Image (tube, rainbow, N blue to C red):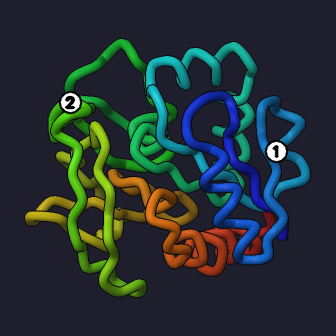
Amino acid sequence: MTLGVLALQGDFREHISILRALDFEAVEVRLPQDLERTQGLIVPGGESTALRKLLRYSGLDRALVERAATGYGVYGTCAGMILLAKRLTNDPGLFPLGLIDIEVCRNAYGRQLDSFEAEVGLREIGPFHAVFIRAPQLVRCGEGVEVLGRYDGVPVLVRQRNVLVSSFHPEINGDPRIHRYFVQHVCAHASFLGS
């Protein structure tokens, strides 16, 4: 199976390293045609405003929305969660892609200096050491959004069909379990749908 990692900006290299350690082929995605050879895409953390502009400029925003509509698996971490959300509470000008029915507040846990690490319990994965860096907070989940993990009562890992998002960075601590879950459960679901 070949997985793509959006490589326009942000910490894409760490995601690629984890996927390759799991023995999956991982490719950098910068143009719409790069999606063609992949069975799923990770949208990494980074700067959400810059990523949104680069997605629009490259045409990847439209291509990703079209592919996701067919069941193609997508996983967004931190800024990726912001970009895949349906609504943002505090940046109406960003225009997220609307791939998962959630509402997100950018930088809700504070600035870079307020970044923190915490142990979170994740359904189907187990205890996980999560790293929150200028993390967004999920303020509303729509119908059909499955909560897989919470921190301090707030959802931090959720899924809706073929889209998975987390407000933390699972790639930083090198623990591959969320990436494995994405491939085995989200991308497998997408393959079943015939994407």
**Residue beneath the point at 44% across and 65% down:** 173
Residue 132, horizontal then vertical, whole percent: 29, 50
Of marks 1 and 2, which one's residue comes earlier in the chain? 1
SS for callout 1: helix
In the rendered image, the vertical position of residue 85 relative to residue 47, given as above or below? below
Residue in the foreground of this view, choosing between 73 and 20: 20
Q: Which quadrant, please, contains the N terminus?
A: bottom right
SS for callout 2: loop
Between the C-alphas of marks 1 and 2, the distance is 33 Å
In the rendered image, the vertical position of residue 26 relative to residue 176, given as above or below? above
Residue 129, horizontal then vertical, whole percent: 32, 71
Q: Nearer the viewer, mark 1 or mark 2?
A: 2
Mark 1 crowd level (few <14, some 14–19, many ≥20, 10 Å Cα) = many
Check disc 2 and report the residue beneath it. 111
Q: Which quadrant, please, contains the C terminus?
A: bottom right
In the rendered image, the vertical position of residue 101 relative to residue 150, given as above or below? above
Residue 41, horizontal then vertical, whole percent: 68, 52
Check disc 1 and report the residue beneath it. 35
**Residue beneath the point at 52% across and 68% down:** 174
